[in-house]
Image (cartoon, rainbow, N blue to C red):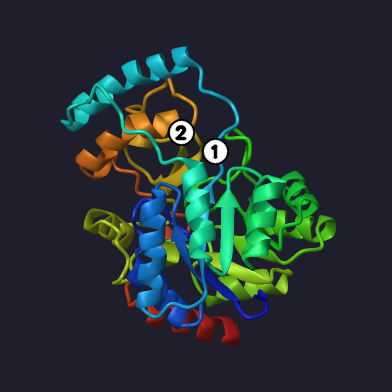
Amino acid sequence: MSFQHYSLIQAPMAGGISGARFVAEASRAGALGSVGAGYLSGAAILESARGVRDAGGDAFAINLFIPPSQTPDAEQVVNAKAALRSCYAAAGVAMPEQFAPLPSFDEQFEAVLEARPAVFSYTFGRLPRDRMDACRARGIVLVGTATSVAEAQALAEDGVDAVVLQGEEAGGHRGSVDPLAPGMALDALLAACRQAVSLPLIAAGGLMDGADMARVMRAGAAAAQLGTAFLRCHEADTAEVWKQRLADAGPGATGVTRAVSGRWARGLANAWMDERAPQDIAPYPEQHRLTSPLRKGAGADWKSLWAGTGAHRSREMPVAELVRTLEEEWKSS
């Protein structure tokens, strides 16, 4: 698969947003659809891949989160749990005594190999050599995520086929290896990486229309990856309250927080980004586990309403229409 064939990539969005029909519609319309599988079990990944294919999606990507190499500090987790009690109380959600574990990465990765998507993309880290070889043996294209020049260079040394350059404007989690690393604006990141890396570079972060796509293509990107732009599509499994907040958003409506998951992430401003947010935060993924029941049971003020800086420019339409519109805008810009 060549990235010359895909100017547009529908960004992988974990958390149940990018369902099989949604991804299939993006792929059928000419974009590269992506399954955000970071929180899916191996069985759910296989079911999702079958669903995409059954719905007519041919080439598509599956994305996973590389797990941290270090075990979380137990005291940090205890303190974070205590700090969240007031948040649960404020939201009117009962805080459980036990929190569900995340799926095993080993199980997830084996499911990816069995599913054989056209592309396997990953974030939060680097993929071991044996796993890269396993993907290549099955003809799977490998795409890593970088938020800095150093990360892009490391991925190039690993031998990936392409690199997603995620600017700090992006919605959702910052894909850096170091969870506390500062972000970098997309245009500056793309310009710097073009000088340092000889690989197809996929621009991501704050891109909302075809003019944005044209800008990054002129700057040397091989493709543009858009996520927030798709959140209000009819086929997206975005919660209605989330879609409404996007529809109502104005410029500057987003902020960043570590309080949801232990990693920096950008979303529509709410309780997670003001004085109500907890100060004691466990490392990722423990903080994610501790806040998951709260986010699922609460109203909009305590949900993770991920969105990029271009949220106020989101549009409501079917996926296929958005893909066509983006392509037309890009070609006319």
Left or right: 8 as drawn, with respect to 1? left
Q: Which mark is residue 285?
A: 2
Q: Secondary structure at mark 2?
A: loop
Place of residue 7 in the rendered image (x, y in percent of width and height, measured from the top left): 60, 76
**Label 2: few (<14), some (14–19) or many (≥20) C-alpha neighbours in 10 Å:** some
Left or right: 246 as drawn, with respect to 13? left
Mark nearest the camera among 2 and 1 is: 1
What residue sits 47% from the left and 59% below the top?
12
Q: Amino acid at mark 1?
A: Pro
Question: In the figure, 75 relative to 136: above or below?
Answer: above
Q: Which mark is residue 67?
A: 1
Place of residue 64 in the rendered image (x, y in percent of width and height, measured from the top left): 51, 51
Question: In the figure, 257 relative to 51: above or below?
Answer: above
What residue sits 69% from the left and 68% below the top?
221
Q: Nearer the viewer, residue 156 or 229?
A: 156
Q: Amino acid at mark 2?
A: Pro
What residue sits 31% from the left and 36% below the top?
292
- Asked if the residues shown at circle 2 and circle 1 are in contact, with their CB atoms under 8 angstroms apart, the answer is yes
**Label 1: few (<14), some (14–19) or many (≥20) C-alpha neighbours in 10 Å:** some
Q: Secondary structure at mark 1?
A: loop
Real-space CA distance between mark 2 and mark 1, rounded to the nearest whole angstrom: 8 Å
Place of residue 41 in the rendered image (x, y in percent of width and height, measured from the top left): 39, 48
